[in-house]
Image (cartoon, rainbow, N blue to C red):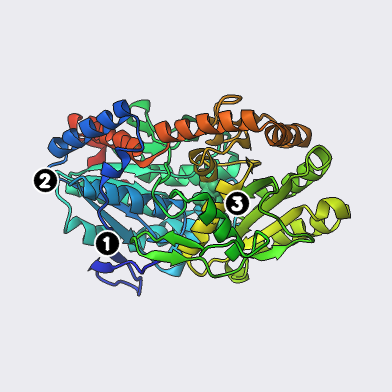
């Protein structure tokens, strides 16, 4: 991926050696015009209407987006795409990243883990953690306040930015805090983290969550908003690929047997040509051929994605009724130091694979996709999803599940569990299949087998899935949700609460 051009926008005074930088991430403007041919006429008119409204509502206002990283993870990917389209539409949307010291990120990682219901490093969340959490952000706030005006709108993303909510109140700008994390039923650990965050985020004009179940109390209803994530139809992950290119990419990556014919080409985000050259690390006992039907799950090597359940479900409830293969793909776990759990989970799946009967083992492929070049990795995911006869997402828990929207956009029939945001994406029996009980391997296997053995049904469901993804989970819809929210915020008087500094 081409390097970001990031420029330092400000550095607050250093106190006690706490580094705190605010950097602006430069984003290439993209025209929404490219959606004219993708969206049905009525939906495109809504986009045009929104563009016209944005022109008047957002004139002479900056829409600031603040998070803690310019790369890596779904939030950064989404910001790059949405800010690019907003800028292309003439909106002065800017992306700033904050940073802190190691102790700051220790606390934010602890919060992140707790919000997901897991203890993380097991450390406390008390008064001294608040001090560590707030110190760098005070300096970042000073740098941001130098540039913000009362006309502006600010969207602060995720726990890393929460202490900025009261600190930026002096700007007079409307402030939204957006959480990209969520669980349908928070456990005690998640609620502990939420109580830690509340004193900051309750001062926002609005708190945005991906779904209603993720708002865990403490914020009055009138200051809640719900916006689900989206995918970029034109990103390397989702761009259209010719069937021949799909085969060439999967062959070049080593996933499909054979030379694949043509070059494994794709278009990079900056529109320069790319070529897949790196090979996938495969655990397999037989080769996958182009003509063989295949069920695919793409996900991190994480127990919550239930890779063991996918292998066991395939072996026990698909293998006997279909000649299809299974590809379980995730990023390579070479950088074990940053993801020790990923390597551990992959090792567990390999052990389960070893225990399969030889006939089934030949049909199960564990694929660790190369990660050196993020766009090469993305286009391999793209090709795998497009090549799949069925895509599965057998998560035990899921915030949203971008892989589901990605597969739906590619007109794949998806078999997934009815958890988190997945249930907002698939309409059961219409645009995919939802398994009520994530542990029910028999139902999981039967749903996959049915799609494999009934290609006409699979194609019909896939076509409806694409329409649903097009209508609900693409960037333009996401931007319209934001615009409506901004219109609402600008009509309201600034909240009196905002003026208090609680921290
Ligand atoms: N992904 C990827 N390369 C990989 C494995 C996964 O780009 O080798 C992507 C996947 O396509 C999706 C994202 O990582 O866009 C995972 O997001 P999701 O919401 O499905 O799950 P999360 O990992 O955030 O729990």
Q: Tell which of 405 and 199 is nearer to you.
A: 405
Taking the spot 45% from the left edge, 51% from the top edge, the residue there is: 74
Report helix, strand or loop for mark 2: loop
Report helix, strand or loop for mark 1: loop
Residue 274 in the image: x percent, y percent? 43, 65
Report helix, strand or loop for mark 3: loop
Residue 30 in the image: x percent, y percent? 27, 51
Which residue reaches farthest bottom?
Answer: 17
Q: Which residue is mark 2?
A: 60
Count residues near mark 2 (Cα–Cα under 10 Å), then give few for <14, some for 14-19, many for 20+: few
Nearest-to-viewer mark from 2 and 3: 3
Question: Based on the displayed image, in which of its 4 quarters is residue 45 positioned?
Answer: top left
Lower sequence index among marks 1 and 2: 1
Which quadrant, please, contains the N terminus?
bottom left
Please tell me whether residue 414 is drawn above or below residue 115 in the rendered image. above
Count residues near mark 1 (Cα–Cα under 10 Å), then give few for <14, some for 14-19, many for 20+: some
Nearest-to-viewer mark from 1 and 2: 1
Ligand 1 within 8 A of label 2's CB? no
Residue 442 in the image: x percent, y percent? 78, 34
Q: Which residue is mark 1?
A: 26
Disc number at residue 299? 3
Taking the spot 28% from the left edge, 55% from the top edge, the residue there is: 95
Which residue reaches farthest front?
Answer: 261
Q: Tell which of 149 and 201 is nearer to you.
A: 149
Lower sequence index among marks 2 and 3: 2
Lower sequence index among marks 3 and 1: 1
Ligand 1 within 8 A of label 3's CB? yes
Q: CA distance from mark 2 to mark 3?
A: 42 Å
Q: CA distance from mark 1 to mark 2?
A: 19 Å
Q: Tell which of 471 and 289 is nearer to you.
A: 289
Q: How many marks?
A: 3
Q: CA distance from mark 3 to mark 1?
A: 29 Å
């Amino acid at each position: 991926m081409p390097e970001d051009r990031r420029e330092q926008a400000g550095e607050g005074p250093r106190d006690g050696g706490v580094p705190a930088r605010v950097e602006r991430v430069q984003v290439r403007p993209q025209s929404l015009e490219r959606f004219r041919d993708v969206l049905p006429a009525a939906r495109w008119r809504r986009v045009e209407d929104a563009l016209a409204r944005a022109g008047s509502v957002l004139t002479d206002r900056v829409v600031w987006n603040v998070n803690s990283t310019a790369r890596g993870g779904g939030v950064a990917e989404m910001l790059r795409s949405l800010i690019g389209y907003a800028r292309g539409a003439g909106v002065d949307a800017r992306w700033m990243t904050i940073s802190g010291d190691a102790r700051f990120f220790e606390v934010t990682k602890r919060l992140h883990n707790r919000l997901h219901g897991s203890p993380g490093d097991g450390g406390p969340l008390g008064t001294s953690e608040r001090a560590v959490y707030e110190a760098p952000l005070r300096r970042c706030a000073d740098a941001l306040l130098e540039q913000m005006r009362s006309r502006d709108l600010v969207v602060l993303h995720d726990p890393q930015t929460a202490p900025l909510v009261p600190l930026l109140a002096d700007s007079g700008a409307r402030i939204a805090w957006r959480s990209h994390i969520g669980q349908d039923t928070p456990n005690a650990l998640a609620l502990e983290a939420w109580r830690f965050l509340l004193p900051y985020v309750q001062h926002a004009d609005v708190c945005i969550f991906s779904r209603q179940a993720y708002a865990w109390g403490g914020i009055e209803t009138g200051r809640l908003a719900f916006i689900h994530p989206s995918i970029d139809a034109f990103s390397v992950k989702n761009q259209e690929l010719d069937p021949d290119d799909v085969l060439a990419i999967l062959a070049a990556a080593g996933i499909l047997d054979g030379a694949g014919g043509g070059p494994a080409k794709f278009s990079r985000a900056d529109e320069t040509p790319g070529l897949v050259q790196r090979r996938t690390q495969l655990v397999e006992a037989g080769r996958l051929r182009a003509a063989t039907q295949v069920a695919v799950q793409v996900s991190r090597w994480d127990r919550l994605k239930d890779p063991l359940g996918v292998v066991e479900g395939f072996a026990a409830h698909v293998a006997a009724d279909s000649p299809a293969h299974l590809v379980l793909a995730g990023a390579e776990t070479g950088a074990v130091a940053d993801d020790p759990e990923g390597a551990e989970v992959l090792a567990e799946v390999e052990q389960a694979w070893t225990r399969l009967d030889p006939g089934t083992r030949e049909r199960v492929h564990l694929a660790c996709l190369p990660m050196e070049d993020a766009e090469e990795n993305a286009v391999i995911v793209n090709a795998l999803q497009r090549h799949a006869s069925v895509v599965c997402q057998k998560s035990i828990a899921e915030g949203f599940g971008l892989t589901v929207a990605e597969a739906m956009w590619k007109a794949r029939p998806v078999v997934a569990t009815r958890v988190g945001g997945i249930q907002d994406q698939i309409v059961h029996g219409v645009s995919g299949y939802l398994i009520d009980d994530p542990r029910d391997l028999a139902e999981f296997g039967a749903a996959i087998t049915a799609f494999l053995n009934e290609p006409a049904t699979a194609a019909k469901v896939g076509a409806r899935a694409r329409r649903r993804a097009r209508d609900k989970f693409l960037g333009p819809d996401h931007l319209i949700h934001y615009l409506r929210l901004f219109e609402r915020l600008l009509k309201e008087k600034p909240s009196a609460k905002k003026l208090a500094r609680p921290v």
